């Protein structure tokens, strides 16, 4: 079973990965971290616009998320693949979903702003995905 697990640095994302690891026998898991495109409206992503190598900067931002994902996978003796995408989270997830049997996503991030944004991402992915989606709380 090929499973796509979009992750940020939230507890909900970790729960989604643990759910995928524990719920599917011999899972082929790809952890996807999406780094937003730089715009004047986005604080955290704006720094990317100033980076000389945007892909390298995105990889650096994803490192912490991937390190935690690998720790969780190692605890369960499961191998994972990691992937970074630049862009809008919903589009990036949906663009990759076709290559998987299912998507397992956390219901929302940590702060109120994260809950509004990530919750919205989970909801849109759930509605538009070409493959089954499990939303983990």
Image (cartoon, helix red, strand yellow):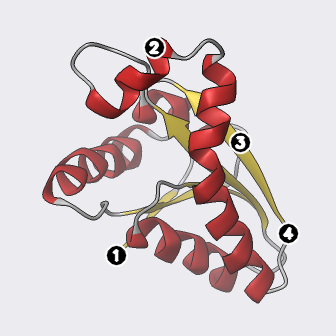
According to the image, label 4 marks what residue? Answer: 79
Q: Nearer the viewer, residue 108 or 126?
A: 108
Quadrant in which the C terminus is drawn: bottom left
Neighbour tally class for label 4: few under 14, some 14-19, many 20 plus, Cα within 10 Å: some
For marks 3 and 1, give the one nearer the viewer.
3
Could you tell me residue 3's position as x and y percent?
Answer: 69, 58
Secondary-structure class at tag 3? strand
For the N terminus, give its image quadrant.
bottom right
Number of the front mark, 3 or 2 = 2
Alpha carbon distance from label 3 to label 1? 23 Å
What residue would you read off at disc 1?
Answer: 137
Q: Are marks 4 and 3 in contact (CB under 8 Å)?
A: no
**Sooner in the amino-acid sequence: mark 4 or mark 2:** 2
Which badge, 1 or 2, is on the more N-terminal residue? 2
Numbered disc in front, either 1 or 2: 2
Q: Is residue 37 above or below residue 4?
A: above
Kindly identify the residue that appears in the image at 63 percent across and 69 percent down: 68
Element under disc 1: loop
Q: Is residue 75 left or right of residue 108?
A: right
* Pointer 2 residue: 49
Mark 2 secondary-structure assignment: helix
Q: Is residue 92 left or right of residue 24?
A: left
Asked if disc 1 and disc 2 are in contact, CB closer than 8 Å, the reply is: no
Mark found first going from the N terminus, 1 or 4 = 4
Q: Is residue 1 visible?
A: no
The one nearer the camera, 117 or 23, is 117
């Amino acid at each position: 079973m090929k499973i796509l697990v979009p992750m940020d640095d939230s507890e909900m994302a970790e729960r989604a990965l643990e759910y995928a690891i524990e719920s599917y026998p011999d899972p082929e898991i790809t952890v996807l971290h999406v780094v937003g495109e730089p715009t004047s409206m986005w604080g955290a992503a704006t720094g990317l616009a100033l980076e000389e190598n945007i892909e390298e900067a995105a990889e650096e931002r994803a490192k912490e998320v991937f390190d935690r994902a690998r720790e969780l996978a190692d605890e369960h003796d499961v191998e994972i693949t990691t992937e970074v995408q630049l862009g809008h989270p919903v589009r990036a997830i949906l663009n990759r979903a076709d290559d998987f049997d299912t998507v397992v996503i956390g219901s929302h991030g940590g702060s109120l702003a994260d809950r509004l944004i990530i919750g919205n991402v989970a909801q849109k992915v759930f509605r538009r995905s070409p493959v089954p989606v499990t939303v983990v709380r």
